[in-house]
Image (cartoon, rainbow, N blue to C red):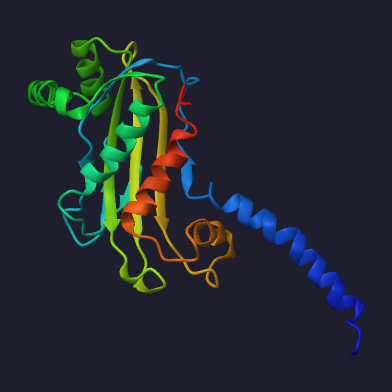
Amino acid sequence: MKPFSKSFVAALTVLCVVLPVLIGCASSTPVRTTQTAKEPAVLKRLVVVPFEKLTSSDASRMARCPVCGTVFTTCDMPQNAELIIQEFFVGKLERSGAFSVIPPYQSDLVHQKVKSENTRLPVTKQLQRVGQALEVDGVVAGYVSCFRERVGYKYSAERPASVTFGVYLIRVSDGEMVWGNIYDKTQQSLSENVLQASTFFSRGLKWVTAQELAEDGVDEMLKTFPGYR
């Protein structure tokens, strides 16, 4: 058998070194952390207000986040899209045991009352007042702009799943946003983007559903949530 050339062996060595690095970095790239003026504080008593959908009123497919001002890309969503992501986030937050959490079904009436009575206030100030009324340290709010389901099957998809949402933590003492993350991801094939290789390998080389993509996003977010363990 003809021996491999030195150039081929060198190229193979580089690939073996670089590919694991790319795969290791892939999982963290979809999440962008919102910058805040102050260092995040660990807030133990939290209230989560009902997550909301962000939709565009025209053909631009764009909507502005009412908390951070970031412009989100929107898509058609199922009726319960925000509830699916909300359930993932609240459930993991409660199960961590690190916080005392008032869930959305208990905060909804207070939240609606504050919004209706303070329509001219910025959303962050409305959330601060919700927190004051419920005597907590922090308020968690979430916004979902895209929750598009996979078209096809887990090993053969015509169109991949796509999910975009943001979650934010408002400190009640001063109304500052002390933490925020945006997750914006559309799964791509391994041949399209080697940086997303970890998504395929962790799921058994298959195309994920929108729910699976959303849960991955919540897990990524909570890695940076102040005090989460």
Residue drawn at point x = 33 percent, y = 23 percent: 170
Tell me which corner region of the image, top left, top right, bottom left or bottom right, holds residue 75.
bottom left
Instruction: Tell me: 183 left or right of 73.
Output: right
The answer to which image quadrant residue 201 occupies is: bottom right
- Asked if residue 205 lies left or right of residue 94, the reply is right
Question: Where, quadrant-wise, is the N terminus in this rendering?
Answer: bottom right
Give whichever of 44, 179 is nearer the camera. Answer: 44
Q: In this rendered view, identify the residue nearer to me: 65 or 3.
A: 3
Q: In this figure, what is the number of numbered marks?
A: 0
Q: Position of residue 228 (x, y in %)?
A: 45, 26
Please say whether residue 135 is visible from this viewpoint: yes
Please tell me which residue is depicted at 10% across the width and 27% down the height of the picture.
112
Q: Answer yes or no: is residue 69 visible.
A: no
Q: Please, is residue 106 above or below residue 183 in the view?
A: above
Q: Is residue 89 above or below residue 175?
A: below
Which residue is at a point 40% across and 33% down the rendered structure image?
Answer: 180
Q: Give 192 or 197, whichever is nearer the viewer.
A: 197
Residue shown at 38% from the left, 15% from the top? 44
- In the rendered view, would you say 155 is above or below 198? below
Q: Position of residue 108 (x, y in %)?
A: 13, 27
Residue 49: x %, y % from top left? 22, 28
Percent x, y of residue 81: 22, 49
Residue farthest bottom in this picture: 1
In this picture, is 174 found above or below 26? above
